[in-house]
Image (spheres, grey):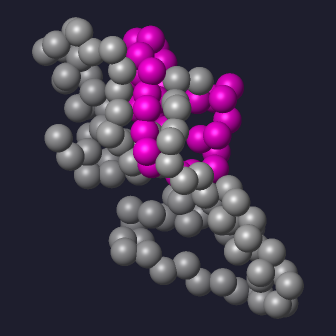
Amino acid sequence: RDDKCSPSEGSNIVLSEMFTKDTYIGLGGLGCSHVCAEVTHGASSIRLPFLSYECPAAELSDDISYPALLRFGTVTTPFSRVIQQIGTQNGWSHIFLISESASEYEQDAGGIVS
């Protein structure tokens, strides 16, 4: 089922699935960072590991805040540092990030803005 990059939709899907079938041993498949942040707290509270190939936001690397989350994909921390360093080296006062959907990726892009 599609969570539509909505934290509430992602949480509803997880709760709905857990209510109808209690034999799950883990969660996976989510990708938008703000959905991952929301759902990983629910996964932790019901003692399920949460695995994802996405969830790229740097703050999700915090094992204390997100103990149930295990990511296999790309983390944005190195990317944001490289972009900031390039801007500093070139004296750029503005760097514009262009994405497919501004509202969908606003949180990820916001993590790069200093």
Q: Which residues are magenta?
A: 37-66
Query: Residue 45: x percent and y percent?
Result: 46, 14
Q: Is residue 56 left or right of residue 6?
A: right
Query: Residue 112: x percent and y percent?
Result: 66, 65
Q: Quadrant of the N terminus?
A: top left
Task: Please state which of residues 41 and 61 is positioned toward the viewer in this rendering.
Answer: 61
Q: Is residue 70 left or right of residue 4?
A: right
Residue at 50%, 42% in the rendered image: 72
Q: Quadrant of the C terminus?
A: bottom right
User: Could you say which quadrant of the image residue 66 lies in?
Assistant: top right
Task: Please state which of residues 54 and 113 is positioned toward the viewer in this rendering.
Answer: 54
Q: Is residue 47 left or right of residue 74?
A: left
Residue 55 seen in the current view: no
Residue at 23%, 32% in the rendered image: 13
Residue at 82%, 90% in the rendered image: 90
User: Could you say which quadrant of the image residue 49 lies in?
Assistant: top left
Q: Is residue 30 above or below residue 66?
A: below
